[in-house]
Image: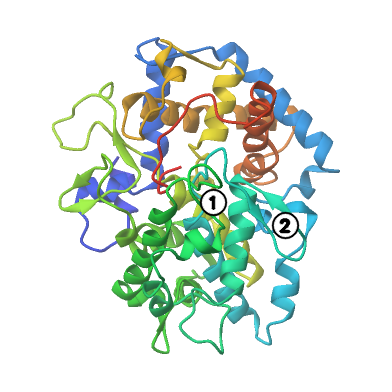
Amino acid sequence: MAEAAAMAGPQGASEGVATLRTLQCVRERCNAILALAKADKLKHFKLNEAKIDAVADFVKGLMDKDYPSYDAVPFHSRLRHFEAGGIDRVTPLTNSWACGPMEEARRLIDLVVVSVLLDAGAGNKWRYTEKGTNFKAGRSEGLGVASFHMFYSGAFSSDVTNPHRADAVGLQRLPDDAVRKAFQATNEAANPLVGCDGRTQVLKRLGSALLQHPQYFEREGLFRPGNMVDYLFAQAGEDGSVSLTSLWEVVMYGFEAMWPADGGRVSLDGRSMGDVWKHSALPEDGTNWGQLIPFHKLSQWLTFSLMEPLMRAGMKLKNTTLMTGLPEYRNGGLLVDMGVLEPQYPEVVSKPHTPDEEVIVEWRALTVALLDEIYAALRAKIGQSEEEFPLVKMLECGTWKAGRVVAQQRDPATSAPPIQIISDGTVF
């Protein structure tokens, strides 16, 4: 773990905090749980390794059907959801901006950040209807389109003459019912959105986080997520490239104040750790953090989604292989529905669970580690290296989509995941 800690960000973090905030630690701790699964030493899931190859075949089949070539597969990014229904919403928006590539990147990052933070699972019933097109969608596509139009309306900007941005003042003054109204959410019987009011609070906390970190987010007296572009370009090395660890530092430390400290979440050395949870199967190592597993799912989803706007602005990113697969219910559901992970007792699937329950922590850790194994099997089948076909492409063309497909086959009415999660909208 020494290398992981050494690569962590600044901000006066203790060794435990710094280590648990590295991407290396996410992969190491999840692989430790997978090793226990391979030894049949876990309480909640049994591993059927022989079925991994079938998952890789299924993912390859979807990819071959949907894309003419492996080069054509786009990144797994929030930008894909702005294309829902086959409608290109971003190009007309960027074409309307009379600005250079740096400001375009700032505005796109403003959009991506608020949209990702609104992207936690919507539940089985909620739907959004787009005005003008009558396009209807739920889940990630609906959330993406709804957040796009909320951004377009100027809801996150403090300046009516510059509506297409997000700034600290605009975010902090959002009404408590802002997301409820913009996302057409109503009561439980009509159009309920899981964790609806919690989403508005996350955006308000984003405003506070921006103000706390001027080194990342302040430019000309204005605090915006998009101002990270200027900070990151200043971190470029002699070869002109920027390490992913610099972007990860901004996400992990710059947005730290957003995440709530309740809901069974871990605090360590006086700091809220966000998407970090305990699993008793890991050995106690004399520290107060040896049994903790970091996932940072929304932070990684945000990081994946930020890569594209940064690259559009001409940034060369290196060390991107540090990123892991995302421990969310589509990737994890795929493993359960296709029999790679077998629940050890009926209650795993018969009752809902909160994110801090060990069964969910175990499921998510195995998901991260097994996505690496599926990825290796898939690359072997298509003859592509990590550089030619990065993990972020498999997540887009394959496992996430495959998880939805098998969920639809099992439950055509709702496409619900096989394991039900009680969510406040800040984890899943």
Query: Which is nearer the eye, 88 or 284?
Result: 88
Determine whether the residue tagged by mark 2 lies in a helix, strand or loop. Answer: loop
Residue with the mark numbered 1: 320
Q: Is residue 148 left or right of residue 290?
A: right
Residue 243, visible in the rendered structure: no
Q: Residue at x 74, y 55 (%)?
A: 135
Q: Position of residue 180 (x, y in %)?
A: 48, 59
Q: Is residue 343 left or right of residue 98?
A: left
Q: Position of residue 402 (x, y in %)?
A: 67, 31
Query: Which is nearer the eye, 227 or 25?
Result: 227
Residue with the mark numbered 2: 83
Q: Amino acid at mark 2?
A: Glu
Above or below 402: residue 94:
below
Residue 255, visible in the rendered structure: yes
Residue 163 lies in quadrant: bottom right
Above or below 2: residue 91:
below
Q: Residue furthest right?
A: 68
Q: Position of residue 309 (x, y in %)?
A: 61, 66
Determine whether the residue tagged by mark 1 lies in a helix, strand or loop. Answer: helix
Asked which colour scheme the image uses, the reply is rainbow
Give the CA distance from mark 2 to mark 1.
24 Å
Q: Amino acid at mark 1?
A: Thr
Above or below 193: residue 169:
below
Task: Look at discs 2 and 1 and give the one toward the viewer.
Answer: 2
Q: Answer few, some or many: residues within 10 Å of disc 2's Cα (few below 14, many 20 plus, some between 14 and 19).
A: some
Task: Give the mark nearest the N terminus, 2 or 1.
Answer: 2
Q: Residue at x 18, y 29 (%)?
A: 285
| Circles 2, 1 touching at the beta carbon (< 8 Å) | no
Q: Is residue 377 left or right of residue 263?
A: right
Q: Answer few, some or many: residues within 10 Å of disc 1's Cα (few below 14, many 20 plus, some between 14 and 19).
A: some
